[in-house]
Image (cartoon, coloured by chain):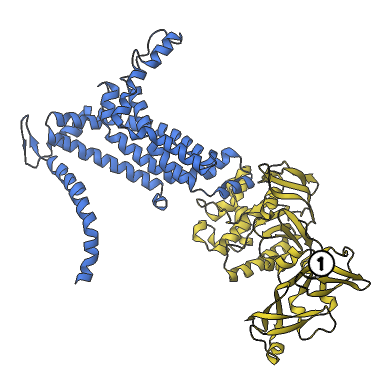
Amino acid sequence: MPQAAEIDLASVTKRYGDDAVAVDAISLKIRAGTYCCLLGPSGCGKTSTLRMIAGHESVTSGDIRLGDVVVTDLPPARRGTSMMFQSYALFPHLDLVDNVAFSLKMKGVAKAERREKALGMLKLMHMDQYASRRPAQLSGGQQQRVALARALITSPQALLLDEPLSALDPFLKVKMRQELKRLQRDLGVTFVHVTHSQEEAMALADLVVVMSNGRIEQAAAPRDIFHRPATAFVASFMGEHNVLSGEVTALDDAGAILTCSGGASFRLPAAAHLELGAPAQAAVRRDRIRIGEAAAPGLGFTGHVRNVEYRGGSMKMTLDAPGVEDFTVYADEAVFDSAPHEIGEAAPLAWSLADVHVLLPSLQ
Amino acid sequence: MIARLAPYLQAAPLALILGAFLLLPLAAIVAVSFWDYDSVQIYPDFITLNYVEALGSWVTWKTYLNTLKFVAIVWAITTVVGFLVAYFLAFHVRSATMQMVLFLICTVPFLTSNIIRMISWVPFLGRNGLLNTTLVELGIVPAPLEFLLFSEFAVVLAMVHLYVLFMVTPIFNSLMRIDRALIEAARDAGANGWQTLTNVVIPLAKPGIAIGSIFVVTLVLGDFVTVRFMSGGQSASVGLMIANQISLLQYPAAAANAVALLALVLLMVAAMLRIVDIRKEL
């Protein structure tokens, strides 16, 4: 079985031309055997980062280390990494065995030996009964298995996956997701997986790296990211959070008061970086909000109901108030039904101080 | 009733055109090839003498061999040159605009007629032409090179010039369809540039090479103007032989040769289609 390697990025920058910065001096340590997801909207630099680790994109400045080797200037095949491409990039003119055996052929391994190894790899992926088919004769999920087999036959220390699930239908997506996770556990190889789906990242990753505008906003375990998003970007990108932004108008031992531009003010727990008069942001989880009068001032507000949607088991209610827009609440179905609110009505909301999470100022 | 007829009516125009301009003339040629003739007239008949005469003569066989020699040489050169040009356009020219501009530049010479393009070689290659004068004056050769014009060299040169674009275009089309991720995947698997070329690019360019080959092979097989003009009458091809027979009013003999040539062309195309499946490219 291949040995997993630690991946270490040291202020890696990728610049296209003179002023287009795709990746801006990011530093990241991915421990050996970690399932790491690079998560962010399109254009955030996640794919460029992956391609730099793979060696398909040159590094403008900074260094990449894989295990004990600085691989910054090595060609892809000498890094001990293997890449799985977004569209799988299977060779359409070769059958599955030859596709999987391709890298062995390039190394000059004898035909019988490489075909036998490739067949073994296909067996591991449960694709051996299709061995003589061409990629075009396979479904998306099957193509992905072949691409995995091809990527793994070189026994890489790290497998790099570029949006591997984006071409699959939702049902298959969930199924292949489980297979990827199982494979990673069985092989113990470091996986780096690029995705724009927070759901995928949460389900798979040991380490989620949220990126935006070429920078890392937060790198942490999925639960940490969800419970304690570092910045407003992370909170809103991960969803399930409402972001309150305003200015700190009072500071005391218990915390601070955040006043929004529309005049509404909210109570914040204490945080080291809060300064009087400075802008600040806080997040409140959508599922921790109650419909009802606030127990203390600053721990709730009354807004106008703009939209109500049924989510199955709970209601999604979107409210507006001066200075607070698109405030979303997941209310339990039974609780909502006991005192239903129609669109256009006013509804009081409340939460407890423990559920207010102060955000760091965004990097930008 | 109308509904049953509709598909036939829809297919009728094309069928009529193909019938009138392809099948009918072909049928006429096949029919005439069995007719009899003398020096002033042709007579409707059914004799196989034309074929016996054509295929029984060593001159015919030599002419066919000579034509096939041209086919082989021109095909080999156009394939290599065509692939190199198409490869450069598809993989080394990055911007789509530049690709289009360069491709159009390739086609510009083809806006003039074949004859003019051929004639333009004469002042360049002739005994006192540009090339010979330059070579002699630079002292590279003591006397003008005779083989440059009115020779088989000149025939091959002109044919390559005339037909290379028919090779460039389909190969370029094939290369443009190659997913660039495949090249990266090959690199990721440790393939060097040469290995990528032989294991990925050329196999995927095969349909284009096959289509280009069909064009070049059929064009060279049927060519007679280039052979007559550029060889100065010193070389022969099947097309030229047929043209000569027509000028001597030996229509049945010419028709018999044409049928034989057609059979050869169809055989070669069939052979190429057996080797490469071009359907997915069309």
Q: Is residue A25 above or below residue A173?
A: above
On the image, numbered disc 1 is attached to which residue?
A247
Q: Evaluate whether residue A310 shows in this view.
A: no
Which element type, helix, strand or loop, lies under badge 1?
A: strand
B150 and A324: which is toward the camera = A324
Q: Is residue A151 above or below residue A327?
A: above
The x and y percentages for residue A294 are: 81, 83
Q: Residue furthest bottom?
A: A338
Counting from the top left corner in percent of width and height, residue A277 is at 85, 64
Regarding residue A118, the answer to whether it shows in the image is: yes
Q: The yellow chain is which one?
A: A
Which residue is at a point 13% across and 36% down the rendered structure image? B252
Colour used to depict chain B in the structure image: blue
Measuring 8% from the left and 34% from the top, which residue is drawn there?
B37
The amino acid on which the numbered mark 1 sits, given as a three-letter code, is Glu
* Camera-side residue of A169 and A6: A169
User: Where's residue B263, x and y in %?
Assistant: 25, 42
Quarter placement of the C terminus of chain A:
bottom right
**In the displayed structure, does residue A149 sit left or right of residue B63?**
right
Disc 1: host chain: A
